[in-house]
Amino acid sequence: MNRIGIYIIALISSMVFVSCQPIEDRLDIGGGITADELDITATPLVINGKKTNKVVLDNKSPVLSSWDYGIGVTRKKTDTVLLVVTGQNDIVFTGKNPDGTEISKVVPVQVDELYFEVPLEWGYLTDGGEKNWVWDTDQPAVWGNGGYMASTAPAWWTLKEPEIDGQATGEGVGAKMVFSLRGAKLSKVKSNGQTETGSFVFDMTKKITLEDGTVWAKGKLTTKGVTVLCGKSPNEEGKPVYEYDILILNNERMVLSYPEPGVGAWGTAWFWVFKAE
């Protein structure tokens, strides 16, 4: 064999050897950074000398982003989000390193003023953290039916708190709901301690106005994964209800309603009457 042939064979052998090496030996994806090394900021816009509830998020670190700002999560490297309560808001950043490890850091943000409009109901319902709600035993009835767009509380078939267990076991006396701002979380705690957890959201644009201009419902509360206490529709085989018209919601009281499908004014609706604990 001549020298050229020997050279070609040697070259091929070298290429085969290299191609058989594990990828891990040839690719170095690098390690990760620690939470202390994160270069992230959450900066509220300042207007008239006050820190507002619009916050600019910025991640300058070599990690994937996940910002939990209380009522939502954004995975953008840079984004602008809206906070819904004054005082200190804790934004939780979770980053994923190239090697797959995750790191987290809490970024406190002070909000002086809700300059950018948000539904006040977030504050009513959660007190800026979490808040317990129970049946309003100060009222004549806490659950039952009445006229859709006619009644504003149980009016036809009405139940008091001790009678609720006959409709939803464990959801009467001793039961409560916990509305949490972090993650917009709703926990239903039954009288035996059993807890069901889901989430909630508002849409305060979905008002219902009567012919005389009176606002009957000021918005809509939608829950996911859990209902409110005794959240069922008896005439629909007890199906769970996840969408409620908000008739009253302030710091002390909450009244919700749900119309049976296809009803018009004066048709059957169901009503829930709660108070802050």
Image (tube, grey):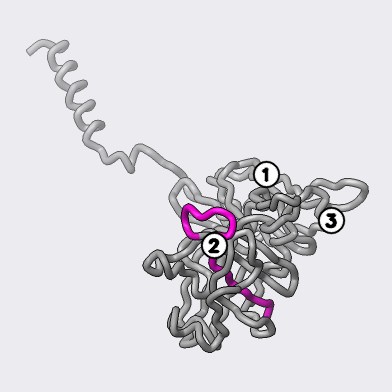
Badge number at residue 258? 2
* Residue 123 x %, y %: 73, 64
Q: Nearer the viewer, mark 1 or mark 3?
A: 3
85 or 28: nearer the eye?
Answer: 85
> In the rendered structure, which segment of residues is drawn in magenta?
260-277
Which residue is at the far right? Answer: 48
Whether residue 96 sits left or right of residue 9 in the image: it is: right
Q: Regarding mark 2 in the picture, which secondary structure is present there?
A: strand
Disc 2 to disc 1, how far (Cα)? 42 Å
Badge 1 vs badge 3, beta-carbon distance below 8 Å: no
- The disc, 2 or 1, on the residue closer to the chain's N-terminal end is 1
The quadrant of the picture occupied by the C terminus is bottom right
Hey, which quadrant is residue 11 in on the image?
Answer: top left
Residue type beneath disc 1: Asp
Q: Position of residue 179 (x, y in %)?
A: 61, 69
Q: Is residue 74 magenta?
A: no
Residue on which disc 3 sits: 113
Mark 1 crowd level (few <14, some 14–19, many ≥20, 10 Å Cα): some
Taking the magenta stretch, the answer to whether it contains residue 262 is: yes
Mark 2: which amino acid?
Tyr
Task: Please state which of the two labelled residues, at mark 2 or mark 3, is closer to the viewer.
Answer: 2
Q: Which residue is mark 1?
A: 58
**Tags 2 and 1 touching, CB below 8 Å:** no
Task: Give how far across and how far down residue 222 sits, in percent.
Answer: 55, 58
Check residue 8 in the rendering and tell me which mark sits there, or answer none: none
